[in-house]
Amino acid sequence: MTERGGVGATCVVHDERPQACRRLRLLVRSVVGPDAVTVADDADDLLERLGATPRAMAVLGLAETEPTGLAVVRRVLSDAPGTAVLVAGSAEAHAPAQQALAEGASGFLRWDAPRAMIRTLVRSLASTATGEDLLPRPAGPEAGAVDIAPAEGLRDVVVDLEAQRRLELSVREVQVLIGVSRGLTNADIGKRLYLSDHTVKSHTGHLFRKLGASDRAQAVSHAWRLGLFVPAPVRRTPA
């Protein structure tokens, strides 16, 4: 976004309903300015734009009952890990929005609360920035892996995306697992990711089940054994 939006990223807007997409585009433009908004034609175009735009954030419309919007949210979270996702819709879209938030979206923008949009957008990006040490990030030209941000004990480690998909781990679950691997409490992880202790505990339970672990230490050990955490490729410095 521009300085007017105050969060320094570009919004990529998508809603398969043409009228809703126009409304969403106008609303986002009114907050961040026209130069900070781009509209995706479909899910494939959305992912292409997110991949080609540095610091891009997805703003995705949700219908009350139609599952297509939630499917797009899941695809972005899976195929573009680390992308901040803001979901938008009416108050009646509360249920799919809560599901999107549980799976890794950063915030929910309601149509009837335009003044709250700035706060929602800022919070969405702020949650990514504040939780940056728990965010898998692109590892550079090496395909199939994303960096774990530097921290004690995991300084030269990446998350293997193929292993993540094979284990059916969401982006949010990987973030929680990274926090667990660093010895953070549920409360500490929640503060970094704007999640409640209960939600972090729920994600941890899902991790234990998916990784076949009975406690936090075993979850981290199994993540290594199953290939989720791997040593980062050596980057040579030109002489």
Image (spheres, grey):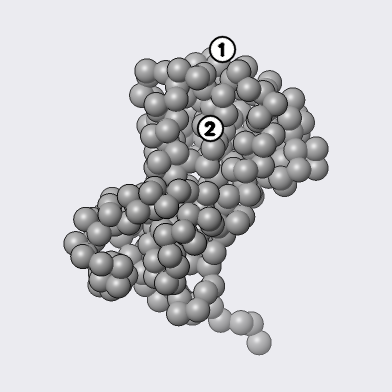
Residue 163 located left or right of residue 181: left
Quarter of the picture holding the N terminus: top right
> Mark 1: which amino acid?
Gln
Residue 156 located left or right of residue 36: left
Marking on residue 43: none
Marking on residue 108: 2
Q: Position of residue 120 (x, y in %)?
A: 62, 36
Secondary structure at numbered mark 1: helix
Residue plotted at (46% across, 59% down)? 187
Of badges 1 and 2, the one in the foreground is: 2
Q: Position of residue 140 (x, y in %)?
A: 53, 64
Placement of 89 over or under 213, stated as above or below: above
| First of labels 1, 2 by sequence position | 1
Task: Please report contact status of discs 1 and 2: CB closer than 8 Å, yes or no.
Answer: no
Identify residue for label 1. 19
Placement of 44 over or under 221, stated as above or below: above
Quarter of the picture holding the C terminus: bottom right
- The answer to whether one can see residue 227 in this image is no
Secondary structure at numbered mark 2: strand
